[in-house]
Image (cartoon, rainbow, N blue to C red):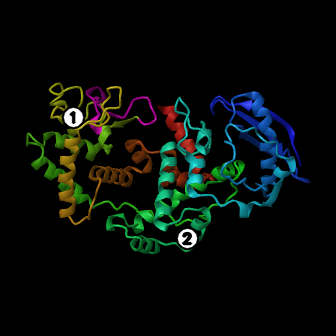
C-alpha cells in the first residue's frame, strides 16, 4: 500500500493541465495495483508538483473505502474585522487541518447533475474539445458511446429524474425500485404534467435503458477515479420490445403497383412520385438513397445505390445483358430530359445544406406526396397505421426477396450486414450442420468465396 513512482504527465488531447500519475495497492493485493491519472488543474509544473501529493492522499483514502473531511470549523465573519483581501494572512497550525476519516458510503451522495457533468459535461477547451468528463477520453476503439448517443443518455436521465421528482443518486435508487410505466404516469399526473408529456408503454423502455447508459461500467470506473464511488441505480432493466414486421399479402403489392400505374404515372404533377414509387418498390432503397440517384448510377444491367466503393454503396443487378427489364427500359425513355439526377428537383424543394453547399435532403415535396398516397392505400386495405410508408415499402421488398431468394440476397439488395444475414440464412445453416461447423464459420466461408468471386 502506498505511493509508487508518481510522475507528472501532460496529455495534449486532454488540455494544458499536468496530471499526477501513480499506482495504488492494498496490503496483500496481487498485481501492480490500480493506475490513477488525476488532473492537478495547473499548467505550471512546480505548482502541479505541490498539488500531486494531496491528490494521492485523497485517492488513497477513497481506494481504501474512506473519504477525507476537513475537521477545522469555518471561521465566523465578525463585523469590524480587517478586510480579508488586505489583511496579513495568519499561519494556521498544522493540526487544525488534520483530516477526519469517515466511510465514503455515508460521505458521498452526489447530485444527478454532478454525475451528468462527469459523464458528458459542458466544459470545453478553446478548440472545442471536451474537458473533465468521461466522454473527453473517447478515442477510436474505446468503449465510449458515440457523442449523439451520449447526449441521448444525458437527456433521458434528466427526463426520468424530472418525472420521478428526484435530484440525488440515493433518491433515484429508491424511486426506481418496482418502477413501471403505469406508476411513472401516475407520478407525472400528480405533478400536473400535460397529457402529451405522459410516458407511454412504448417509450418507457427506451427512456429507462437510455438513462442507465450514464451508469455504464466504464463510466462508473471514471466516477470512482474522481472521488464518486457509486453503483448503478438500474440493477435490472426492462426487456426490449421487439416488433416483428408482418408483410402484407402479395396481392396487395400487385394492386398497389397497378394503382400507381393508373393514378400517378400519367399525371404531370405526380409523375415524379411514380418514379420514386417504382424505384422504392423494386430496389427497396431508402428515400435519400433514391432521390440522390444520378444517371451515371443507372447502367444497362442494374443500378448503383449509395456512394460507390464504400461500405454503404451497393450494386443491385436487375437483368443480364440483352434481357428485358421494364423499370430500366422505362428510365431510359426520359434519360437526358432531366438534370443530373434521375428524379429532377426543380419545383422549389425543401432542402438543408451541410455548410459546404452539398444538398443533404432532396425531393422532400415529392416524398411527402407519395407518403400521403401510400398512407391512404395502406389504411384502405386495413393494414393499420404506418408512419414511414416508404421504409415500410422497403421492408415489403426485403421480405419478398428473402422468401424467394433467401436472406443473403435480401442483404445484398438492401445493403444490410452480409455476415448477420449469412448466419441466419437456412442454406448456410444447413451447410454448417452437414459439415459440423457453426453458422458463424459457414458465414465467413461464404463471405470469403463471395469476395473472391467479386
The label shown at residue 343 is 1
Which one is in front, 4 or 366? 4
* Range covered by the magenta-colored residues: 290-312
User: Residue 63 has which mark?
Assistant: none
Furthest toward the right, the residue is 28
Q: Badge 2 is on which residue?
A: 175
Gap between marks 1 and 2 measured at Cα: 54 Å
Q: Is residue 355 left or right of 13 when viewed as pictured?
A: left
Residue 288 among magenta residues: no
Q: Horizontal and vertical percent for residue 159?
A: 46, 59
Q: Main secondary structure of the magenta part?
A: loop
Residue 213: quadrant of the picture = bottom right
Task: Please check the rendered image and state whether residue 303 is part of the magenta-colored stretch, yes or no.
Answer: yes
Residue 320 in sight:
yes
Do the residues under discs 1 and 2 have CB atoms within 8 angstroms? no
Q: Nearer the viewer, mark 1 or mark 2?
A: 2
Question: Of all residues shown, which one is farthest toward the front?
Answer: 80
Earlier-in-chain disc, 1 versus 2: 2
At x 77%, y 38%, the residue is: 51
In the displayed structure image, the side of residue 407 where residue 291 appears, left or right: left
**Number of on-image labels:** 2
**Does the image show residue 318?**
no
Q: Which image quarter: residue 49? A: top right
Residue in view at x 10 percent, y 49 percent: 263
* In this view, 347 is above or below 167: above
- Element carrying mark 1: loop
Local secondary structure at mark 2: helix
Horizontally, residue 262 falls left or right of residue 400, namely left
Amino acid at each position: 500500500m502506498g505511493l509508487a513512482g508518481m510522475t507528472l504527465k501532460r496529455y495534449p488531447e486532454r488540455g494544458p493541465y499536468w496530471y499526477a500519475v501513480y499506482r495504488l495497492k492494498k496490503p496483500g493485493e496481487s498485481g501492480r495495483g490500480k493506475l490513477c491519472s488525476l488532473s492537478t488543474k495547473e499548467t505550471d509544473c512546480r505548482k502541479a508538483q505541490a498539488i500531486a501529493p494531496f491528490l494521492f492522499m485523497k485517492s488513497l483514502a477513497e481506494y481504501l473505502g474512506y473519504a477525507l473531511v476537513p475537521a477545522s470549523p469555518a471561521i465566523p465573519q465578525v463585523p469590524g474585522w480587517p478586510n480579508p483581501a488586505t489583511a496579513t494572512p495568519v499561519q494556521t497550525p498544522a493540526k487544525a487541518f488534520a483530516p477526519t476519516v469517515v466511510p465514503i458510503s455515508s460521505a458521498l451522495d452526489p447530485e444527478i447533475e454532478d454525475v451528468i457533468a462527469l459523464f458528458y459535461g459542458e466544459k470545453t477547451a478553446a478548440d472545442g474539445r471536451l474537458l473533465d468528463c468521461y466522454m473527453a477520453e473517447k478515442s477510436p476503439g474505446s468503449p465510449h458511446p458515440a457523442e449523439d448517443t451520449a447526449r441521448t443518455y444525458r437527456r433521458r436521465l434528466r427526463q426520468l429524474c424530472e418525472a420521478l421528482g428526484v435530484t440525488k443518486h440515493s433518491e433515484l435508487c429508491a424511486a426506481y425500485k418496482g418502477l413501471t410505466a403505469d406508476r411513472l404516469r401516475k407520478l407525472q399526473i400528480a405533478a400536473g404534467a400535460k397529457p402529451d408529456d405522459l410516458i407511454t408503454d412504448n417509450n418507457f423502455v427506451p427512456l429507462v435503458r437510455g438513462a442507465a447508459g450514464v451508469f455504464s461500467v466504464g463510466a462508473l470506473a471514471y466516477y470512482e477515479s474522481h472521488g464518486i464511488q457509486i453503483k448503478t441505480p438500474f440493477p435490472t432493466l426492462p426487456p426490449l420490445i421487439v416488433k416483428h414486421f408482418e408483410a402484407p399479402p402479395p396481392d396487395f403489392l400487385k394492386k398497389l403497383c397497378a394503382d400507381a400505374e393508373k393514378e400517378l404515372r400519367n399525371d404531370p404533377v405526380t409523375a415524379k412520385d411514380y418514379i420514386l414509387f417504382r424505384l422504392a418498390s423494386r430496389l427497396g432503397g431508402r428515400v435519400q438513397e433514391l432521390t440522390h440517384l444520378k444517371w451515371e448510377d443507372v447502367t444497362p444491367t442494374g443500378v448503383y445505390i449509395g456512394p460507390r466503393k464504400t461500405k454503404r454503396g451497393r450494386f443491385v443487378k436487375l437483368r443480364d445483358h440483352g434481357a428485358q427489364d421494364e423499370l430500366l427500359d422505362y428510365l431510359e425513355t426520359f434519360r437526358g430530359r432531366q438534370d443530373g439526377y434521375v428524379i429532377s428537383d426543380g419545383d422549389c424543394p425543401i432542402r438543408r445544406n451541410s455548410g459546404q453547399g452539398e444538398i443533404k435532403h432532396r425531393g422532400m415535396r415529392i416524398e411527402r406526396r407519395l407518403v400521403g398516397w401510400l398512407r391512404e392505400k395502406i389504411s384502405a386495405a386495413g393494414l393499420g397505421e404506418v408512419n414511414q410508408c416508404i421504409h415500410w415499402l422497403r421492408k415489403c421488398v426485403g421480405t419478398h426477396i428473402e422468401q424467394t431468394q433467401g436472406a443473403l440476397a435480401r442483404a445484398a439488395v438492401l445493403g444490410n450486414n452480409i455476415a448477420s444475414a449469412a448466419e441466419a440464412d437456412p442454406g448456410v445453416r444447413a451447410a454448417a450442420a452437414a459439415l459440423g461447423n457453426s453458422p458463424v464459420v459457414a458465414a465467413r466461408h461464404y463471405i470469403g468465396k463471395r469476395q473472391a468471386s467479386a
